[in-house]
Image (cartoon, rainbow, N blue to C red):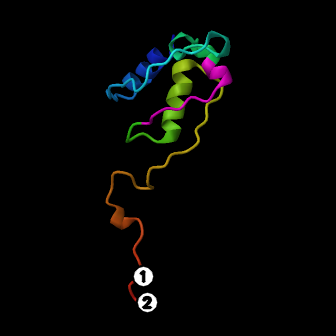
Amino acid sequence: MGFSSFVEKIDRFCDYPQPWETRKDYVPLGEFGVEPDKRPISEMISSSIINVDKPPGPTSHEVAFWVKTMFGLPRVGHGGTLEPLWAGQSQGYGCTPNRSR
């Protein structure tokens, strides 16, 4: 399974049908690496960090659990997310300023 099919599998699992775009084509030098589509997924998982574009809705913990379940991995972690504490809700409820000052 190559990188593209890995990403497509996660997108289908998360019901996130956002199309992917190729921004820049490149030709890697053979002595310095392998094209991502030709690198086996087992190599990517064992020796890399894989960035997943988490769709809105599920938590980072849930997505990490899905990846762990889909690939039968012993350990999967996440580095957190940058979305607000109450994503998808009115941000006015997160913090109310003290107007009495």
Residue at 58% across / 12% down in the picture?
39
Bin the neighbour count of mark 1 within 10 Å (Cα to Cα): few under 14, some 14-19, many 20 and up: few
- Residue at mark 1: 98
User: Residue 100: image x %, image y %?
Assistant: 40, 89
Q: Amino acid at mark 2?
A: Arg
- In the image, what residue occupies the spot 50% across and 40% down? 60
Asked whether the residues under the numbered discs 1 and 2 touch, taking CB atoms below 8 Å apart as contact, a structural biologist would say: yes
- Please give left or right for residue 66 compared with residue 14 in the image: right
The image shows residue 11 at horizontal and vertical percentages of 39, 25
Q: Is 83 on the left or on the right of 79, as rendered?
A: left
Within the image, what quadrant is residue 31 found in?
top right
Under circle 1, the secondary element is: loop
35 lies above or below 62: above
Q: How far across and down, in percent of the image, does residue 83 sit?
A: 44, 50
User: Where, quadrant-wise, is the C terminus in this rendering?
Assistant: bottom left
How many marks the image carries: the answer is 2
Q: How far from the left and from the top, in percent, is residue 8?
A: 41, 20
Residue 93 position (above or below residue 65): below
Amino acid type of the residue tagged 1 in the rendering:
Asn
Residue occupying the point 61% across, 20% down: 44
Q: Is residue 42 left or right of residue 10?
A: right
In this rendered view, identify the residue nearer to me: 101 or 60: 101
Up the image or down, 96 lies above or below 39; here it is below
What range is drawn magenta here? 44-54
- How many C-alpha atoms fall within 10 Å of the one at disc 2: few (<14), some, or many (≥20)? few
In the image, is residue 37 part of the stretch drawn in magenta? no
Q: Which residue is mark 2?
A: 101
